[in-house]
Structures are given as C-alpha cells and as structure tokens.
Amino acid sequence: MDRSTRARAIASSSGCAFARQPVSALAPLARVWARERFVSHFMLLALASGTTISMAQLATTFYALKLGASTAQIGVISSMESLGMVFMTLPAGFLVARYGARRVYFIASAGPMLLNFVLPWTGVWYAIALTQWLIGLCIPFRIVSMNGAFLAQLKRIGFARAGWYRAAMSVGMGMLGPWLATWLIGAQGYAATFAAAGLCFAAMALFSRTVLDDASPAAASQATDWRAGLLHLRTLIGFADIRESLVVEVFSSATKSLASTFIVVLAIKTLGLPQTQAVQLLMMQGVVAVIALFAFGHLVRRLSHASCYAISLACAVGGLTAFGLGHSFAILMAGVVMLGIGSSLLHLINMTQLGTHSADKNTISGLYNLASMGGSFCGAMGGGALSRYVGLQATFLWWLPLVGMASFALWRLRLAHAGHAARHAAPRSGEPV
C-alpha cells in the first residue's frame, strides 16, 4: 500500500470514528427516553383504566341499590365479574403470549365498551349480574396484557417502581373514579354515566396501541401448544417464590374484595351514613394505596419479607376489627387506612418476587391474575353469603379467622421452603423447588 492510499485509509477510519461518536454518546439518552416514555404512557393507561373501572363499578352498585337490591344480591353482582375473570384468566395468558398484548388488549376492550351502553336498560338485579359476568370474561385479556408488559419491563425501569402500576390504578379506582361516578350520576343520570364508561373503554383501546407491543416470534411459537402451556404452568407452580406469591394474592384479594364490595353498603344501609361519606371512604382507599405504593418501594427492598408480612397481618386485623365494631365515619376511615397499607405492602412483595423471575411474564401474569380474581370472587360471594346469617357488620369480624388461616398457610409454606433449602444445596436461579 503506497503512502497516499494509507493516508486516505487513516482519514476514512478517523471520519468513521468521529461519525460514530455522537451516535454512541446519544445511545444512553435514547435508552432513557424510551424507558421514561414507556413509564409515562403506561401509567396514563393504568390511570385511565382504574378510573373507568371504578366509575362503572360504583355506578353499578348505586344503580342496584336504587333498584332495591339486597346486600346478598349486591354481593352476587360484585362477584360475577370476578367469576367471569376466573374462567378466562389462564386462556388470556396463552392468547396474549401467542398474539401479543397490543392486539389482544384492543379487541378485548370492545366487550366492556358495548356492555356499559346496555347496562342502564337492564332494570333487574340478575340482569345486572349477567352483564358483570360478561364484562368479567373480557377484563382478563386487558389485565394480563398490562401486567405482562409491566413485569417484562420492571428490570429496565427499576424495582423501586414496582408499585407505580398499582399506584396509578389506585388513583383512578380510589379517587378519580368514585368522584366522576358521583358527579355524573348527580348531574346526568345513570345512562350518561355508563355511556361515559363505554367511551372511555374505546379511548383506552386506541391509546394502548402506542404503549403495548406485539408478540415476539419466540413467544408466539411457544404459545401454540396448549398442552405444553399447561405443563409449563405446573412447572411454574413448582417454584417456591411463585407459589408463595399466589397464596398471598388469593387471601389478600379476598379480604380487599370484601372491604371494597361492602364498605359502601355498610356505610349507607347499616350505619346510615350519607352517600358522600361512603364515597369518601372509597376515595381514601385510593389515597392510601397511592401513598403506600409510591413510598414503600424502597422500604420493602430493605426489610425482610417476614417483617413486611407481619406488618400486613397487623394492618388487616386492625382494619377488619374497625369495620366490624365501628359505628362512626372516623373509625371506618381508620379501617380503610390500615387495610390499604397492608394490601399495598403485599402487592409490592409480590411484584418484586415475580419481576425477578426468569419465566415468561405473560404466563406468570396469567397465574397471578387467576389467584387475584379467585380471591376477589370468594371475598364478594363469601361476604354476601355470610352476611345473610350473621349480619353485614359482623361479617368483617368473622373474616378474621380466614386471615389467621392465611397467615398459618404462609408460615408453613415458608418453613417448608427453608427446610428444603437447609437439606439441600442452594438451588440455582430459576430452578424449581
């Protein structure tokens, strides 16, 4: 190679280096931008979802009360949505893995949209229950899509943000949703309120296409065989951390569902409080959840899980006792605060454990939501059935032994896991126990 050729080669390589330097310098900024864009768009979608669901649920409860539904009938109405979700949660996990969250979420939003337009023309409590069951068949596809997307991104956005998704949902479900439902019912009536909920579902379906992704070819190919998918579910349940999260979620969701379903009925029908104070109790649920989920992320990572479980147990016992014995708005509010703190701590533990697992997040999300919806169904249906025999307020006291059983089951599960680990060498990461 002569001198001129060598000089041109050196100049060319130097030019390429200088050309690559700005790109490499901008790469970290591009990653940060993509990460924060996902977080902001995802939280906006979660906020809208929580607001819409809460607005429709509270309007449904008030509409059923207007029609003269009893406490047990309201329990059936509230449990029907969870029952529908139980049927479809596992199929939702397979379909989201096969076709992608973006497509499944978009299609699944059409059912709640149309049914909310139909709901104000039902007129009887069992027809309302039917619409809730049909809505429940659609909701798991939306929840699994969002949960899977969030768990898949949790390592990238940071485990300190593990509670942000639930916090955004809680702002909508506990604050904006009840306020909007109360205002719209008072100003425009039930038909307009349910129509607004239907339009919100349509808007979320469109916006979700900017947030959620399509299925990866690898995940889609793995999701084609449902028998292999069921075998994979059995394998996942063999992991001690997943098994622990599922047990915790069943009992946590049951207790939370009991409180969310009947706190309004307890305040209005049993204690004679005005409707505005009943709505304030629901809004306080959202306020407490938001503060706890945003503030306790670092705390959960510093404390042991046993300590967090003990705090949650104490909060659950205190909250249920306040509901079972309280006769004033202030005592009920204290119960809401304690239950909100306990539930938020449990959610943060579960998200941290599941987010670090190496398995497919859509399948994990399906299992987790099956546990959540199963617990919600048992809480609403069991509370309604129990209230027929012991009265609504005493139902919360009778729920305390169930909390004790859950704590004992969790203690045995963790004890068995610790014993297995002591007898054998420490399992490798991602190895079932």
Image: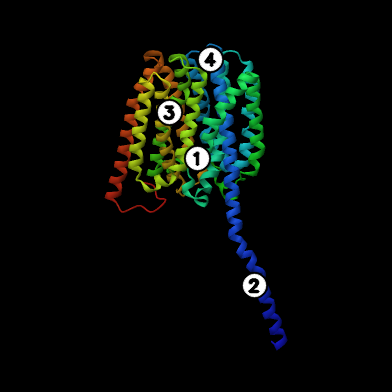
Q: CA distance from mark 2 to mark 3?
A: 61 Å
Disc 2 marks a residue whose amino acid type is Ala
Name the residue tied to disc 3.
Answer: 336
Name the residue tied to disc 2.
Answer: 17
Q: CA distance from mark 1 to mark 3?
A: 27 Å
Q: Which of labels 2 and 3 is toward the front?
A: 3
- The location of residue 18, given as percent across then percent down, is 66, 71
Disc 1 marks a residue whose amino acid type is Ser
In front of the other: 429 or 51: 51
Q: Which of labels 1 and 4 is toward the front?
A: 4
Q: Are there few (<14), some (14-19), or many (20+) residues within 10 Å of tag 2?
A: few
- The location of residue 201, given as percent across then percent down, is 63, 31
Label pair 1/4, CB-CB below 8 angstroms: no
Q: Which mark is residue 65?
A: 4
Q: Secondary structure at mark 1?
A: helix
Sequence-wise, which precedes: disc 1 or disc 4? 4
Sequence-wise, which precedes: disc 1 or disc 2? 2
Q: Are there few (<14), some (14-19), or many (20+) residues within 10 Å of tag 4?
A: some
Sequence-wise, which precedes: disc 2 or disc 3? 2
Q: Secondary structure at mark 4?
A: helix
Disc 4 marks a residue whose amino acid type is Leu
Q: Is residue 306 above or below residue 378?
A: below
Image quadrant where residue 314 sits: top left
In front of the other: 425 or 136: 136
Sequence-wise, which precedes: disc 1 or disc 3? 3
Q: Is residue 161 above or below residue 92?
A: below
Q: CA distance from mark 1 to mark 4?
A: 34 Å
Sequence-wise, which precedes: disc 3 or disc 4? 4
Name the residue tied to disc 1.
Answer: 365
Q: CA distance from mark 2 to mark 4?
A: 72 Å
Can see residue 329? Answer: yes
